[in-house]
Amino acid sequence: MPARILIVEDESDLARVMAAWLAKRGRAFHHAPDAETAFRKFRRETHALVIIDVVLPGMSGLELLRIIRSESQVPVLMMSGSTSPAHRQQAMKLGAHAFLRKPFTPAALELAVRKALAFGVSV
């Protein structure tokens, strides 16, 4: 079974669209609606890529990225609806491989996922 992609997104409609897109391309995935749930899933399973929304209930996506980076170099794609460059700058400083501004097109998501997976170590 291929390594999974972990989607950390609290907007259920967007999470469903992303999950459908990944499934259509034969990619296995997990979904977590918040950072705490995501981190538990991250620790239990091997993931080829983690896609994290910056703004999440409870712990922020940036804090989740900081925690993931303390124990893994798995590729991380951050996303946000914010137009502030501060989120992008902080995400990249913390070790994100890419940053998507919402709303994004399927083509932009596909390109970011392919680049991040190409960067990552095969598992």
Image: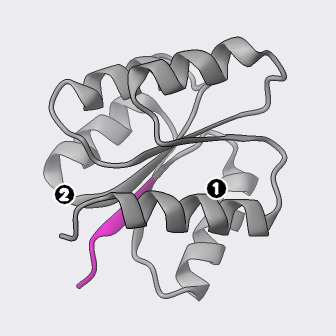
Residue 86: horizontal and vertical position, in percent? 68, 12
Q: What element carries label 1?
A: helix
Amino acid type, label 1: Ala
Tell me the distance, in whole angstroms, between the alpha carbons under discs 2 and 1.
19 Å
Query: What residue is shown with label 1?
Result: 15
Q: In which quarter of the image is the N terminus?
A: bottom left
Residue 73: horizontal and vertical position, in percent? 24, 41
Q: Quadrant of residue 43?
A: top left
Residue 74: horizontal and vertical position, in percent? 28, 48
Please rate how many residues cluster around mark 1, counting C-alpha atoms within 10 Å: few if below 14, some from 14 to 19, many from 20. Answer: some
Residue at 46% x, 35% y is 96
Earlier along the polypeptide chain: callout 2 or callout 1? Answer: 1
Q: Do the residues labelled 2 and 1 touch (CB within 8 Å)?
A: no
**Is 21 situated above or below 62?**
below
Residue sitting nearer the eye, 58 or 18: 18
Total of numbered circles in the picture?
A: 2
